């Protein structure tokens, strides 16, 4: 087994592992319930981790995880002139919907 990544929380670790499993990798989450003893152990030792069962999967899984972690963000300019970034589909300045 080989550690692929350390996640900031269990929800993200589960999301990463599920996405990798759906793509055919042998991913699993380790340290699933260890956050409960943070303080007894150093906090960085209690973070959940995504592991792979087969070492030969590591390069392709790292590439997929990197793509998942660095999704491009949308940017559009509203008719009112406001630059809207991220996943927003409505202008926060005037409330108009994102153009199609």
Image (cartoon, grey):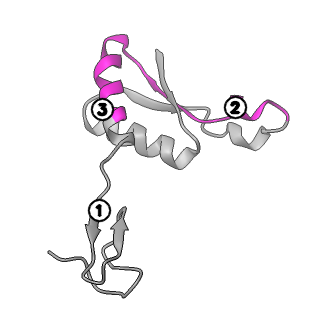
The one of 48 and 62 positioned closer to us in this rendering:
62
Mark 2 to mark 3: distance in Å? 24 Å
Q: Position of residue 11 (x, y in %)?
A: 52, 49
Q: In which quarter of the image is residue 53?
A: top left
The one of 61 and 100 positioned closer to us in this rendering:
100
Instruction: Kindly identify which residue carries mark 1.
Output: 75
Q: Please determine whether, in this image, residue 52 is positioned above or below residue 42.
A: above
Magenta stretch: includes residue 1: no
Q: Quadrant of residue 33?
A: top right
Q: Where is residue 71 in the image (x, y as percent from the top left)?
A: 32, 46
Mark 1 to mark 2: distance in Å? 34 Å
Task: Identify the residue shown where x is 41% and y is 40%.
Answer: 16
Q: Is residue 93 left or right of residue 67?
A: right
Please name which of the two marks, 1 or 2, marks the residue nearer to the observer: 1
Instruction: Kindly identify which residue carries mark 2.
Output: 44
Boundaries of the magenta span: 40-66
Task: Identify the residue shown where x is 32% and y is 18%.
Answer: 59
Q: Is residue 77 left or right of residue 17?
A: left
Check the image and name the residue furthest to the left: 100
The one of 100 and 2 positioned closer to us in this rendering:
100
Please name which of the two marks, 3 or 1, marks the residue nearer to the observer: 1
Instruction: Kindly identify which residue carries mark 3.
Output: 64
Q: Where is residue 87 in the image (x, y as percent from the top left)?
A: 35, 64
């Amino acid at each position: 087994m080989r550690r692929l990544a350390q996640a900031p929380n269990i929800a993200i670790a589960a999301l990463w592992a599920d996405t990798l499993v759906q793509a055919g990798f042998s991913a699993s989450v380790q340290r699933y319930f260890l956050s409960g003893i943070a303080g007894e152990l150093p906090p960085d030792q209690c973070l959940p981790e995504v592991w792979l069962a087969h070492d030969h999967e590591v390069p392709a899984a790292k590439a997929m995880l990197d793509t998942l972690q660095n999704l491009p963000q949308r940017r559009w300019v509203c008719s009112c002139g406001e630059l809207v970034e991220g996943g927003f589909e409505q202008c926060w300045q005037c409330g108009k919907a994102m153009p199609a």
